[in-house]
Structure formats: C-alpha cells, structure tokens
Amino acid sequence: MLSSSSMSSGGGNGGDNAKNQLQTLLTRAGHDNPSYKTKQIKNSLFRSTVEFNSMQFVGQPCANKKLAEKDAAGGALNWLTGQGSGASSDSRDARDPDHMSMLLKPPCRRRHSHRRR
C-alpha cells in the first residue's frame, strides 16, 4: 500500500474534485472505477483507502468520510502524475517506470474464442 502525501484537509492537486479527476482518468484509460474503503479510527477521524488497477492508496486521517476519500484520491492522483512528496528526489523513484504509462496500458481482458463458421 502507498500512503498519500500529507493533505489532511483533502487538498492537493485534486482539491475538491480529486475523486472525480481520478475516476475520469481511470475511465479514459479503460479501467474500472476506483473503489473506496473507509474506516473510522481513533479520535473520531476517518482514513480511506482507494483501490484501482490492483493498487491501493491510503489517505491521511481526516475529520469525516468524504474528506478521507478525497485525500486518498488526491494521493493516488499525485502518484500517477509524479507529483507526490519527494517523487523527484527519491533515488528509488528515479528507477521506477512512468506511473501514468502503467495506468494507460489497457487492462488485461480475457480473449473470447470466436466460433468457427
């Protein structure tokens, strides 16, 4: 699992539209919509995990479920666009493949056998 950068108020590049932007990006790339799992943690805070394309992104604790989902989506968007915290300075990231190109690969789909005539 990957953790989003610190966007406790649901901000970041996606802002209030992070969930919409992520869904649009995935749909245009031919993938299914992301799914969100949100849990209430201590001190009445919520933490959400967004999952798509067999990847999971965990957001920061937020005051409510809606903000937690936006934060997780914002973290996923930041990772996909290479704008996550330390993305350019981390030597491990320099060897990683381009995240957006991984997403834009068409999803693996089973081939259906054609009937012979």
Image (cartoon, helix red, strand yellow):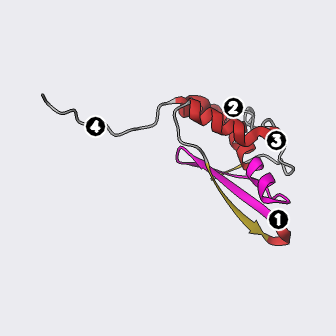
Q: Dot 1, crowdedness within 10 Å: few (<14), some or many (≥20)?
A: some
Asked if marks 4 and 2 touch (Cβ < 8 Å), the reply is: no
Residue type, mark 4 in image: His
Mark 3 or 1, closer to the camera: 3
Q: Earlier in the sequence, mark 3 or mark 1?
A: 3
Q: Compute the Cα span from label 4 to label 1.
A: 46 Å
Residue 27 pos. (x, y %): 57, 34
Examine the rendered structure and indicate whether residue 23 appears above or below residue 41.
above
Q: Which label was assigned to residue 16? A: 3
| Residue at x 18%, y 33% (from the top left corner) | 115
Examine the rendered structure and indicate whether residue 102 appears above or below residue 52.
above
| Residue at x 52%, y 48% (from the top left corner) | 54
Mark 3 or 2, closer to the camera: 3
Task: Identify residue for label 2.
Answer: 81
| Residue 105 placement, left or right of 62 | left
Mark 2 or 1, closer to the camera: 1
Q: Which label was assigned to residue 45? A: 1
Q: Dot 3, crowdedness within 10 Å: few (<14), some or many (≥20)?
A: some
Q: Compute the Cα span from label 2 to label 1.
A: 28 Å
Span shown in magenta: 45-71
Task: Identify residue for label 4.
Answer: 112
Residue type, mark 3 in image: Asp
Residue 82 pos. (x, y %): 70, 32
Mark 4 or 2, closer to the camera: 4
